[in-house]
Image (cartoon, grey):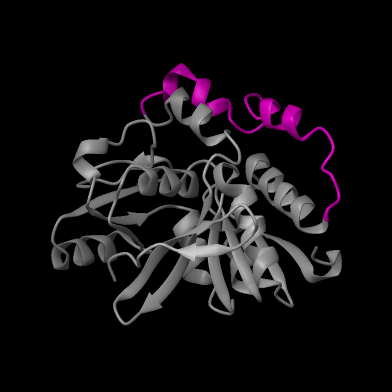
Amino acid sequence: MIEENKIQILSYIEGAKKARGLTVIIDVFRAFSLECYLYDMGVKGIRPVETIEEAFLLGSQIDHSILIGERRGKKCEGFDFGNSPSTVDRERIKGATVIHTTSAGTQGIANARKAEEIITGSLVNARAVAEYILKKNPKEVSLVCMGNNGVTYAAEDELCALYIKSLLTGVSLENFEQRVKDLQEKGGEHFFNERTQEIFPKEDFWLCIKYDIFPFVIKVNRQENGYFTEQIFMKNKGEERKAEKREK
């Protein structure tokens, strides 16, 4: 277990800037839930970027690349897909390198410059995230709730952080399953608003609130031309095996 005083929960882009140690950038609706689904769909790799301009530039340099991203929820103009796990074409992205930019999640990665190590987190792989951290046993853990557009409170991100913390400390989180269900009316309302269905399809909500369904974490690495990620699977006994590194 990890001692509670070694774990800090931070918020938004400003929180990412303060993150130290092993840092988890959390974005449940929808960036890092989507990335888990993308890896499960068979993408070759994911390259998170901060800006739309970076995405287009990187896309021009990488063969068989797909641009996925949003600003304020809406698909970026000229991109292949928005930040929506239910609308991505599995056959089209299989074997591709995804270049991903969002209003919150990827901004957190770009701003966590003082972190010793960065992984991403969401409900769909929360237990794997905790297992990875327990295996590493770092001196300090930062759980960063990216919130809405990286600037305002999002109940789903805080719940995910509290759940991961509970798994790390061994202290049960009360009413967790009910709190997940409550997100439909406390944080996920926009997925059920007819006026915003085109941007936030309700199918995305149900995909993002599933928890502990993926047995891997997504680790963020950096090289000269930006960030790249790798999928790290967790074994039942807490041992890890690295999948083959994705496209750099």
Tell me which residue sits at (36%, 46%) in the image: 38
Q: Nearer the viewer, residue 45 or 79?
A: 45
As displayed, is residue 12 above or below residue 18?
Answer: above
Q: Is residue 222 visible?
A: yes
In the picture, measured across the screen, residue 188 lies left or right of residue 98, that is: right
- Residue 13 horizontal/vertical position (percent): 57, 62
Q: Residue at (58%, 26%) from the top-left corner?
A: 189
Check the image and report above or below for 169 versus 87.
below
Q: Residue at x 52, y 27 (%)?
A: 206
State left or right for residue 156 relative to residue 242. right
Q: Is residue 229 magenta?
A: no
Q: Nearer the viewer, residue 136 or 51?
A: 136
Q: Residue furthest front?
A: 237
Looking at the image, is 3 positioned above or below residue 91?
A: below
Left or right: 200 in relation to 89: right
For residue 181, above or below residue 15: above
Question: Magenta stretch containing residue 195, yes or no?
Answer: yes
The residue located at (35%, 79%) in the rendering is 223
- Picture quarter containing residue 98? bottom left
> Can residue 19 be seen from the camera position used here?
no
Q: Position of residue 114 (x, y in %)?
A: 58, 80
Image coordinates for residue 240, horizontal then vertical, percent:
55, 63
Residue 227 placement, left or right of 248: right
Q: Please report the bounds of the magenta region as a residue range.
A: 170-198
Observer-nearest of 248 and 244:
244
- Using the image as rendered, state which of residue 232 and residue 81 is in the foreground: 232
